[in-house]
Each structure stands twice: as structure tokens, then as C-alpha cells.
Amino acid sequence: MGVEVGVRGLTKSFGQRTVWSDVSLTLPPGEVSAILGPSGTGKSVFLKLLIGLLEPDRGSVLVDGTDVCSCSERELYAIRKRFGVLFQDGALFGSMNLFDNVAFPLREHTRKSEAEVRRIALEKMELVGLSGAEHKLPGELSGGMRKRAGLARALVLDPEVILCDEPDSGLDPVRTAYLSQLLIDLNAHLDTTILLVTHNIEVARTVPDNLGLFFRGRLVLFGPREVLLTSDEPVIDQFVNGRRAGPIGMSEEKDAATAAAELAALPAAAPREITPQLTPSPGVPERTAVRRRTERVRASLDTWPAPVRERVLAGLRAEQRGGRPGEPA
Ligand SMILES: Nc1ncnc2c1ncn2[C@@H]1O[C@H](COP(=O)(O)OP(=O)(O)OP(=O)(O)O)[C@@H](O)[C@H]1O
């Protein structure tokens, strides 16, 4: 099963500019989580801190008792091998064919025989639907295929945590839907902890178990999908519904008075829908994370205000029936 990642009191600045401060969250083991937020709010920086590519001003990132932010180089090397990272552009080597790209971490970080490297690389390529494309060069592929190749490469060392920075960027809606399904199927097969960064509302609504949002230098909220998808916090509501009205402006934050006037002019809010989460494809095992998560969320209900608790419970009940909240059982 995937490992838990605990982020405690993390603050990051570049020079005088604080990207965000005092960020704490826990990525539950084996669950899929997503971080949202307008451009420039520090989502990619957050991913880099998780794997020790950047150092924080303060705070810790705990993986199995080791603090990524203060451990030795040797420990960091060992921790990084437990992470698989899908960078925004797939980060493939242009001169290597897909097979060699996918096999690269195995040849670089393990002493496996070439036969073993071949077996593992082909298995992961099959898992992401790239069988038969081994000899293609990245330049000959569509964006969707490059993403899937990047994902196969992120999987070859059997990571306990997968980080995906905007896996949907540059993909058409159909390819994005396939990729979303692939992430859910991978999670079902591997039970790996997954963290996505995404701008895509459909992905945010249908893939993750947990959501968080960065805005104005802080993590506004991180919690179960039902909480974020029904939140009446203006910036969360604006983001998950892709609306112009609200605190997020085109190029910068709006002033509070403009945002408040826009929100007041909106029609009375309809009850917020929790879009059903994707389930594994036919023939793929069940996601064991779902049962664990339901228990975890039920156990945490007391920590939420009463109206939020009601909405979360409605969401959980609908999930168990395989329907939408509010539908008759
Ligand atoms: N190595 C660096 N040195 C200095 N500033 C940096 C560095 N890396 C990122 N930043 C700054 O940190 C801020 C957050 O950047 P980041 O790329 O994490 O944002 P993001 O939320 O991922 O944005 P987007 O959604 O557009 O990808 C930006 O202002 C960026 O310019």
C-alpha cells in the first residue's frame, strides 16, 4: 500500500516573496488527493518540496518517520526512490524511444538484469495502454501518449507515492477523460498514494478522494472531496464551479469590495452537487482506498460544522448506493 505523507507547518519564500506559509496536511495512504489553485499560487513548488528538490524556510515533510526537509543526502536519495513523479510535459528524453525512456530509472537506480528491466518496462507500458509503441520517439507522439509514457516511467520503481503535475494540461477533453480513468485504475491496481495538481474542474470533481486549494499565500482548506465540492467558502466555490464572480481575478486578486458585489449579484445558490467519483473500469479490482476513506471520513465528522457534516454524510450515503446525493435510496 502507498505511504502516508505528512506536511507540517511548511513555509516557502523566494527572496522577499512568501509563496505560502504554515501549510499542514496529510496525504492519506493509498488515497488520491488533488491540489487546486490559481496560477502562481505555488502548487508546483509544493510538489518540489515534497521530494526535497526545494528547501522550505520552516516546516517538515514526513514520509515514514523521515523528514524530507532535514534528512541526510543518503536518506533523501532513498526517499525519492519511493516517489514516482509525472512532470507537466512528461519530461521525456527526446532522443530516446519510449521503451528506453520508461526503462531509464530502472537502468539508473537498480542493478536489475536487462531481461528484468524489459519485463518491468513492458508491464508498465501495458498498464498505461502503450503496448506496441515501444520504438516510437517522443516527438512522434500525441500529448496524451507522452503523458502516459511519463506515467509509465513514474511507475517502474513501484513507487509508494505518485506526484502528477497537471497531468491533464494540453489534453483534449476526451484524452483527459481517459487519463482520469487511468489514474483511478492505477490506484485500484497499485493502491498507491497519489497527489495531482490540476486546473481541470472535471478532473478535480471526478478523480480525487481529497481536495485542497491554495490562495493568497495559504492552503485555504484540505479535506474530503465532499467538503470542498459543497463548500460555500467564496474562493473554493468560485474555483470548483469555474465562475468569474468571486475573489480570483483574471491576472491578480480582485479587491474585496468587487468580489463581494459580484457574489451578491449571483442568483440564489442552487444546492451544490457532488459529482459522482469515477470507479475502476470493468475487470479492474476495487479500490481498497474507498473503504478505508469512508471509515476515516466518518471518524472525522465531528471536526466539521453541522451543515458540512450533513453534506458529507449525504455524499457518503450516495457513494455507497452508487448514485448522487439527494437521490432516493
Ligand atoms: N526556483 C524559483 N526561484 C524563484 N521563484 C520561483 C522558483 N520557482 C517558483 N518560483 C515562483 O513561485 C511562485 C509559485 O510558482 P509555481 O510554479 O509553484 O506556481 P503554480 O501554482 O504551480 O502555477 P501554475 O498553475 O501556473 O503552474 C511563482 O511566483 C514563481 O515565479
Image (tube, rainbow, N blue to C red):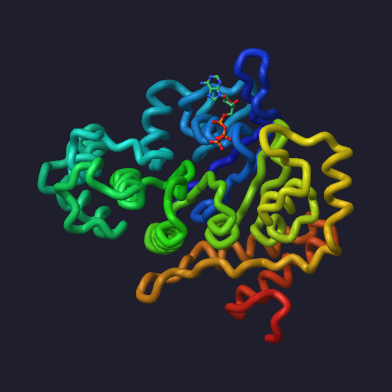
Residue 212 visible within the image: yes
Residue at horizontal 72 percent and vertical 48 percent from the top: 244
For residue 18, above or below residue 2:
above
Residue 229: % across, % down? 69, 59
238 left or right of 155 in image: right
Residue at horizontal 38 percent and vertical 46 percent from the top: 159
Residue 123: % across, % down? 23, 56
Q: What is the count of numbered marks?
A: 0
174 left or right of 228 in image: left
161 left or right of 311 in image: left
Viewer-proximal residue among 85 and 261: 261
Viewer-proximal residue among 175 and 182: 175
163 left or right of 99 in image: right
Q: Quadrant of ligand 1?
A: top right
Image quadrant where residue 111 sits: top left
Q: Where's the C terminus, which quadrant?
A: bottom right
Q: Where's the N terminus, which quadrant?
A: bottom left
For residue 49, above or below residue 305:
above
For residue 74, above or below residue 5:
above
Residue 6: % across, % down? 59, 40
Residue 161 visible within the image: no
Residue at horizontal 62 percent and vertical 66 percent from the top: 294
Residue at horizontal 65 percent and vertical 76 percent from the top: 324
Q: Residue furthest top?
A: 15
Residue 72: % across, % down? 44, 21
